[in-house]
Image: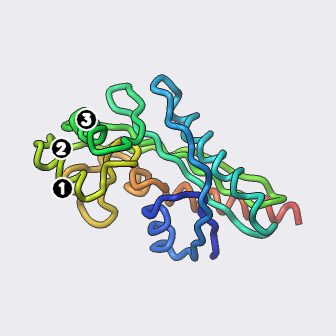
Amino acid sequence: MLVFLASRSAARRRLLQKSGFEVRVIEPPDDPPPDAGCDPYKTALRAAKGKLNAVLPRLAADAVCVAADTVVVCDGRVLGKPQNADQALAMLRFISGKRQKVITGVCVGAAGVGCVCDVAEAQCEMAVLNEAQMLRIIEEGRAVGVSGGYAIMEEGDDPFCRVIEGEKSTVVGLPLQTLRRLLKELEKRRCSQA
């Protein structure tokens, strides 16, 4: 199945491809960073829907578009995306040894059919990191520009972060079970309108 992905995330693209989808990326406009005191569920959904709505008008009527946005909460604080190595190091120091709630909003839509959206949640736990490990994570490109300041390894076990509840794909940035359910809902909606 061909889907258009409204995201700059290479991890989301790879997740879709590994799940058997043919993927075409249509980059959405940048979304603003989350407000520290925001409702993370509403923020993730609003950002995902904003990406979808920005891209959907550019697609053919029968095209299916997928958009997602991830928000990370640690110690009651909504974390953004560090923009440079210094911010990434500060965020890694903050999340070291702590549990985080990862919330990913997903929207699936097609022109003339509308969209269906939902949120998935996972819990993960970060190992206690030393300075050398933090610098290695930054050098590997797994911290700057990433929600919560850390990108979990997509394949295999991550040496620094483990998922303790929910789907690993939610932590990567696209909850596959939620996506499959939303695609089925969109298809039912499409069939009922035919």
The image's mark for residue 90 is: 3
Mark 1 neighbour class, 10 Å CA radius: few under 14, some 14 to 19, many 20 or more: few
- Residue plotted at (70% across, 65% down): 64
- Relative horizontal placement of residue 64, taking residue 128 as reference (left or right): right
- Of tags 1 and 3, which is closer to the observer? 3
Q: Quadrant of residue 113?
A: bottom right
> Disc 1 residue type?
Pro
**Marker count (numbered):** 3
- From the image, tell me which residue sits under label 1: 159
- From the image, tell me which residue sits under label 2: 127
Work out whether 190 lies above or below 86.
Answer: below
Task: Tell me which label, 1 or 2, sits earlier in the chain.
Answer: 2
Q: Secondary structure at mark 1?
A: loop
- Of tags 3 and 2, which is closer to the observer? 3
> Disc 3 residue type?
Ala
Quarter holding the N terminus is bottom right
> Disc 2 residue type?
Ala
Q: Quadrant of residue 154?
A: bottom left
Question: Is the residue under label 3 in contact with that under label 1 (CB below 8 Å)?
Answer: no
* Closer to the camera in the image, 177 or 157: 157
